[in-house]
Image (cartoon, helix red, strand yellow):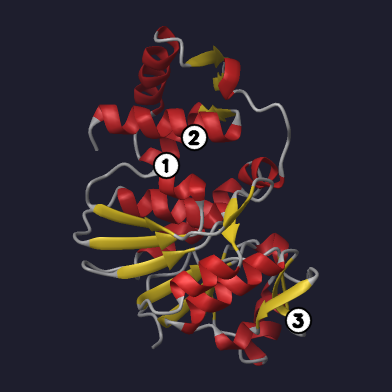
């Protein structure tokens, strides 16, 4: 990746989250901490970020004044989300058309896909953060229309669902606020549930990206039963007994730390 593109992504990351640690940025971009330090010095020298111990933070108008659900989730289970994203990225092939939702795990997946050598990738999303955070020419980004939820940083509602209905996806990647055997994948927003169901309905294969902290939790609205997804990628933090319970119930769970396998069709 060109240094200018990497620095642009780092700046976008800091602006969206309010700040970032050198270690996280190095892992996300696959470079050494020294390289990240140099990038941050360049950005700080231009007055775009403020250097702090171990990283950098947003400055001026870029510094968030209100903590949102999005900013909270960006800081949660980062390593787990990176592992999930790394595994899921292995299922995306050259020339694919995919949907990625507005979750922070999908953001990690989109960033990883941008760093790969894939050709002809079309990525459709209901996430303003993902759309604005991708810069590589190799990824053709399409954003759904609809109503913007500033707290969740997502686009949803009837317009988004109607836009997705005639499309065709090779894979739809979705997440959720919670996952349980009786309620399936759940969320707090009807607009989001409708949007994700529209994407899942036109996808050849469907994948859940769910970190272990969300298992056993239920939110207001159900999106889809867990058994209806072709696979759900989870990190190693999920206890073995929970993994086996879901597997016995017909849920296709895949641990992110296992060797890559072929995605079921």
The image position of residue 139, as x and y in percent, is 28, 54
Dot 3 surroundings within 10 Å: few (below 14), some, or many (20 or more)? some
Dot 2 surroundings within 10 Å: few (below 14), some, or many (20 or more)? some
Q: Disc 2 marks which residue?
A: 13
Q: Viewer-proximal residue, 245 or 52?
A: 52
Q: Disc 1 marks which residue?
A: 133
> Element under label 2?
helix
The image position of residue 94, as x and y in percent, is 21, 66
Residue 203 lies in quadrant: bottom left
Q: Looking at the rendered structure, which numbered label has been put on residue 183? A: 3
Residue 181 lies in quadrant: bottom right
Q: Are marks 1 and 3 in contact (CB under 8 Å)?
A: no
Q: Earlier in the sequence, mark 3 or mark 2?
A: 2
Residue 170 seen from this side: yes
What quarter of the picture does the C terminus occupy?
bottom left
Q: Is residue 146 above or below residue 226?
A: above
Disc number lying in front (2 or 1)? 1
Q: Are marks 2 and 1 in contact (CB under 8 Å)?
A: yes
Q: Viewer-proximal residue, 208 or 133?
A: 133
> Element under label 1?
helix
Q: CA distance from mark 3 to mark 2?
A: 33 Å
């Amino acid at each position: 990746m060109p240094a200018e593109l990497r620095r642009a992504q780092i700046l976008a990351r800091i602006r969206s989250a309010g700040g970032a640690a050198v270690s996280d940025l190095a892992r996300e971009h696959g470079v050494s901490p020294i390289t990240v330090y140099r990038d941050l010095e360049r950005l700080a020298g231009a007055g775009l970020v403020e250097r702090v111990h171990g990283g950098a933070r947003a400055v001026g108008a870029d510094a968030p004044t209100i903590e949102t659900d999005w900013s909270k989730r960006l800081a949660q289970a980062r390593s787990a989300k990176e592992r999930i994203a790394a595994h899921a990225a292995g299922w995306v092939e050259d020339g694919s058309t995919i949907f990625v939702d507005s979750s922070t795990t999908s953001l990690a997946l989109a960033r990883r896909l941008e760093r790969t050598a894939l050709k002809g990738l079309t990525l459709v999303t209901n996430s303003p953060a993902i759309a604005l955070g991708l810069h590589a020419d190799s990824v053709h980004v399409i954003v759904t229309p609809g109503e913007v939820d500033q707290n969740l940083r997502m686009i949803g509602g009837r317009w988004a669902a109607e836009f997705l209905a005639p499309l065709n996806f090779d894979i739809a990647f979705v997440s959720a606020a919670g996952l349980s055997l009786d309620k399936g994948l759940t969320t707090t927003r009807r607009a989001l549930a409708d949007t994700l169901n529209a994407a899942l309905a036109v996808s050849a294969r469907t994948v859940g990206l769910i970190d272990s902290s969300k298992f056993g939790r239920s939110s207001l609205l159900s999106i889809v039963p867990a058994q209806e997804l072709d696979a759900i990628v989870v990190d190693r933090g999920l206890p073995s007994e929970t993994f086996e319970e879901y597997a016995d119930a017909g849920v296709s769970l895949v641990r992110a730390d296992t060797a890559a396998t072929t995605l079921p069709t």
